[in-house]
Image: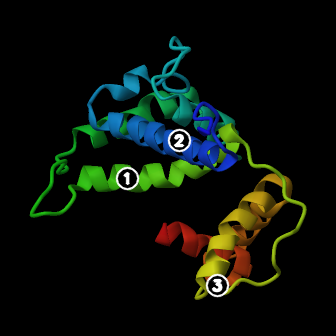
Amino acid sequence: MMADTTTLTPEQQHALVDILFHSETYYEIQKFVRPGTIKAYGPPFQDDIKQSDAPILQTLLSTFILKLPGLRDVSPEFWKVRIADLIEELSQAELSESYDKGLLGVRKTLATAISALIEYPARGSLGGVPKREHGAKKEYDINNADDVMRSWHDAMQEAIYGDLLDEMFAKAAETDDLTKHPSLVQAMHEFVVVK
């Protein structure tokens, strides 16, 4: 009897969504190496463009960044002139894009690093994060690979369904010393650095 190849298992669906988010996020980031890309981005850089060339980046920017205290009240010229010009200058910078001496070029390295960081919040906000019933651990050991891996998933739960973001901002206002943050934040940071 042949297996049904038209239906994906939940594990296959999860893997496919991961691959698609990774691929699209990297594609959107990599487009910024071409000068003029920011001119097709849309709000807040251009008011006359309603459909962005970078839907994932646009969604994250409008959903999260533009609502942050300090950024939600800046003038439109801040985005249209200062930030747009900065992005344009970076796209025109003489950064190596090819393989130099057997190593990835600076542009590819930056695009890979940025897309790796952005794809997680994109996946969470656009793909959803199902709520788990069991809560986060109280202590995480950053030297324990299982704790570091679990910290990321627990931090996503706490950020979406709890008040981790508020706690992180409050602690960051007090100190820039990562060791003063809860072990969950320290382990999550370790996950991001390693990943």
- Pointer 1 or 3: first along the chain: 1
| C-alpha separation, residue under disc 3 versus residue under disc 2 | 32 Å
Q: Which residue is nearer to you in this view: 153 or 73?
A: 153
Nearer mark to the viewer, of 1 and 3: 1
Quick one: which residue is furthest to the right in this view? 133
Q: Is residue 79 left or right of residue 10?
A: left
Mark 2: which amino acid?
A: Phe
Residue at which label 3 appears: 179
- Pointer 3 or 2: first along the chain: 2
Callout 3 environment at 10 Å: few (<14), some (14 to 19), or many (20+)? Answer: few
Please name the residue shown 85% across and 58% down the image.
Answer: 132
Please name the residue shown 69% across and 46% down the image.
Answer: 10
Q: Are marks 2 and 1 in contact (CB under 8 Å)?
A: no
Q: Which mark is residue 112?
A: 1
Q: Is residue 68 above or below residue 61?
A: below
| C-alpha separation, residue under disc 1 versus residue under disc 3 | 27 Å
Q: Quadrant of residue 184?
A: bottom right
**Mark 1 element type:** helix
Please name the residue shown 58% across and 41% down the image.
Answer: 17
Mark 1: which amino acid?
A: Thr
Q: Is residue 18 left or right of residue 24?
A: right
Residue at which label 2 appears: 21
Callout 2 environment at 10 Å: few (<14), some (14 to 19), or many (20+)? Answer: many
Mark 3: which amino acid?
A: Thr
x, y (%) of residue 92? 22, 38
- Pointer 2 or 1: first along the chain: 2
User: How many callouts does the rendering have?
Assistant: 3
